[in-house]
Amino acid sequence: MIYTVTFNPAIDYAIGIENLELGMTNRASFEQFLPGGKGLNVSIILHHLGIENIALGFIAGFTGMEIKRHFEALGGKSDFIELKEGLSRINIKIKSVQETELNAIGPVIDEESIKILLNKLHLLKEGDTLVLAGSIPSSLSDSLYSDIMKMLADKNIMIVVDATKDLLVNVLQYKPFLIKPNNHELGELFNVSLETREDVIPYAKKLQEKGVQNVLVSMAGEGAVLVTQTGEVFASKAPKGVVKNSVGAGDSMVAGFIAGWHEKQDYAHAFKMGVAAGSASAFSKVLATKSEIEQVYRCIELL
């Protein structure tokens, strides 16, 4: 079974404004409500691809119940933990000449609720896959992802981490199966600027030296690069298409890679599935469907 964990899910409220003017009254051309959070996005794409999975995480208040309702209406299966206090956050995505995001803080997660999650994760068994995705509330320790991986170290679970900064750095010693930074996030770890596919390869290998098995680097218009534990390097240009929505594209790439790996245990196929899913979601107003992903997959050429 595949499990995703989202510590701070949200309602993503997307609102279209033709030309946003600060300090003025702006009227929307459209609006949309969707369940948000990196792990939830991964779960939805996996569901679209026919891969069974369960979403774990924390929800609070009436906004939390709305997240659960929307998520399950999309076909997702969840085992959320309901917090006793607070409200799940609403993140605002303004679609104008440029995309602007306003991400809220979210509720405080108490120690009792953390213990409930850890008890659920402790039940995972050999052969399961765990996806730890996204940020965590500021009230929690940056060692939380690594604490979870340490707890599960002897269970032979495939763990995927999509996080940044200390959350990511702290897990490397526990040898996650896959991490997916973008080129800017990878560069931040080494205080360098990485602009081309060739630039990212040596730094992805540096992360492998620290413990991670496979490094998948998304690069928006420059495509993507995968450096594998077998020493192979796969690269692809960005598929051609009109970008309609960048939200969830990186999460879709993670889901596509996982789906491809579970299907064939072949890195080239998993990489192409990741690129296809990420690009297809970017070309869609919502997360991509299976047919949209398959259409993009057929256009991908490995370099």
Image (spheres, rainbow, N blue to C red):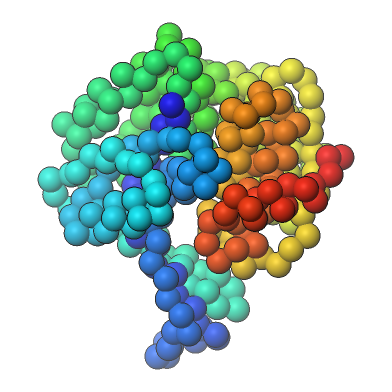
The number of discs equals 0
Q: Is residue 21 above or below residue 87?
A: below
Q: Is residue 220 above or below residue 178?
A: below
Q: Is residue 71 left or right of residue 116?
A: right
Residue lying at the far left in this picture: please name it. Answer: 84
Q: Residue at x 19, y 59 (%)?
A: 62
Q: Residue furthest right?
A: 303
Give the percent coordinates (x, y) of residue 57: 31, 40
Given residues 44 and 17, the one toward you in this image is 44
The answer to whether residue 206 is seen in the rendering is no
Residue under the point 44% across and 13% down: 126
Q: In the depicted view, which residue is nearer to us: 119 or 280?
A: 280
Residue drawn at (40%, 90%) of the image: 25
Which quarter of the rendering shows the C terminus?
A: top right
Q: Quadrant of residue 255?
A: top right
Q: Is residue 264 left or right of residue 156?
A: right
Residue 86: image location, x then y, percent: 18, 53
Depth order, front residue of 248/96? 248
Looking at the image, residue 160 sits to the left or right of residue 240; the answer is left
Q: Where is residue 174? Give x, y as percent.
A: 50, 18
Nearest the viewer among 198 and 269 is 269
Q: Is residue 282 visible?
A: yes
Quadrant in the picture for the N terminus: top left
- Horizontally, is 192 left or right of 21 in the view? right
